Image (cartoon, rainbow, N blue to C red):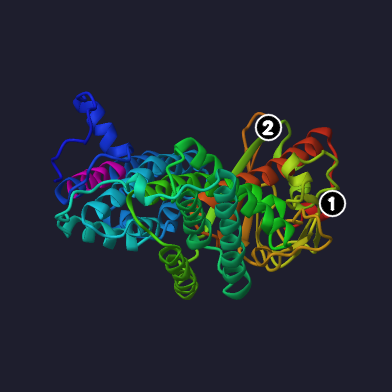
Amino acid sequence: MENAPPSGSEPPRSAAQGLLALLFGTTAPVGRRRYALVGLTLAVIKYGIDAGLIYATTGHLWRPIEYLSPALSTRTAILGGGNEWALALMIGLTLPFLWIGLSMSLRRAVDAGKSATLALFFLIPGLNYLLMILLSCLPSAPAKVRERSAEELHPRGTIAVALYGILAGVGLAVGLTLLSTMVLGEYGQTLFFVTPGLIGAFTGWSFNRDQDRGLRQTLAVSSLAIGMAGMSLLLFAIEGAICLMMAMPLALAVGLCGGALGRQMARYSRLTAGHMILLVLLLPSLTAVEAALPAPLIEREVATSVIIDAPPAAVWPNVVGFAELDAPPAWIYDAGVAYPVRARIEGQGVGAIRHCEFTTGAFVEPITAWEPRERLAFDVSAQPAPMHEWSPYAHVHPPHLDGYLRSRRGEFRLVDLGDGRTRLEGSTWYTLDLGPTPYWSLWSDAMIHGIHDRVLEHIKGLSERGFVSVPSAQSDGA
């Protein structure tokens, strides 16, 4: 069966067209040998791409065992801060591989005479490897795989089925988000990666289970379901607008893959709502396992620098403490993300306490290195919330505001360029307890870079104008 030509009277395809249909199409049959061969080949290609990116940016030779790790934090830990472009490219290149894996797993499950819902396990890190091994071993079913006939379908109104799928997706999003965040305190891969895919799959299956309404309409309805799910979290005061905005690109991309897969599930399989509900009920268990076995927190560094037309002696006092910033913040900070407004210090030398005041409160920073005109380093013993969540309600405080992004330490380095200028370098080391970490670190790194830019540019302006923000006697003491 796995070598049988496509049914119907389609014109013969070239080898390239046949390969594209196999990888990205939805009808080409997939037997176990073809599935295993393509899966192994694509895994090697994906490993080569990721390993090449990591080696090009860090010089680290990525071992295959690291590639097989289901924890996405392994990639982020190796790349570290300052390589956002590599992370973004790696995430973007993952999406076509995700669709190929989902589509081919569905067709392989159907070819083996199994439920099309098996393909959804491809979304779950760790279980996807077990699924691929299983599907590579199962023989093809004796009966010829075919789509459901017109006699098996009972068309209903398009608007009615679209609303049914959207409402089901909204209920799924609200329920799983409440369980994950409020009960288990887990913001992980199941919530941000698996749940959108399942919402899309449920919507796509529901929209097409009585008749095939086409890919374009299915993707439109799946997009609407993801958007309405996000709006429901905002209206029910479960989340704020800024975090939903940041989560939406990932949720929408995975949800569209799920929607296209759900359409195929409806075309190939006589699934009932019970099958989908059973799959939905597995998600709380996955979330609980993820909460019980958290990935280790990896400390990330974000480093930023600026050239100042002043010597280190003029720059140092403004590093130790600085007057209130008057420059308007970028829009995302103005919308609620915390940003610095001033800094002051109590005492001098190692053991002094620096207070960097943000719009949400003050960072308390005990000084650990005091090298006048060269280096100032500090730990972070207390920090405020990273943002004020924008919401229609007066007070919304999701659990992720407490400790999921935590600054650990920071440092300023002054490099004398020898011509009356100084390169001022600022670094922040932080941990991020949100999954998938590679995706969220793109946002957190970018926002910390924005904070650095705001502070360093302010220090640059003060130093070049000849102003200082602390008494000279204090700043020169060692």
SS at mark 2 in the image: loop
- Residue 304 lies, with reference to residue 239, above or below; the image says above
Residue 244, how many percent across, how many down?
A: 65, 52
In the picture of the structure, the residue carrying the numbered disc 1 is 470
**Mostly what secondary structure, the magenta segment?**
helix
Q: Is residue 274 left or right of residue 239?
A: left
Residue 39 shown left or right of residue 401 in the figure: left
Q: Quadrant of residue 120?
A: bottom left
Mark 2 belongs to which amino acid?
Arg
**Residue located farthest toward the front when viewing the structure as drawn:** 151
Q: What is the x, y in percent for residue 194?
A: 47, 58
117 relative to 205 in the view: left or right? left
Q: Is residue 59 visible?
A: no
Q: Secondary structure at mark 1?
A: loop
Is residue 278 among the parts visible in the rendering? yes
Residue located 44% across and 57% down the image: 73
CA distance separating discs 2 and 1: 21 Å
Label 2 sits on residue: 421
Q: Where is residue 78 shown, x and y percent of the image?
A: 41, 52
Q: Quadrant of the C terminus?
A: bottom right
**Residue at image location 61% in from the left, 64% down from the top:** 404
Cβ–Cβ under 8 Å for marks 2 and 1: no
For the point 32% across and 37% down, the residue is: 25
Kindly identify the residue that appears in the image at 21 percent across and 56 percent down: 112
Task: Write the start and end of the magenta stretch as one range.
Answer: 36-46
Q: Nearer the viewer, residue 230 or 88?
A: 230
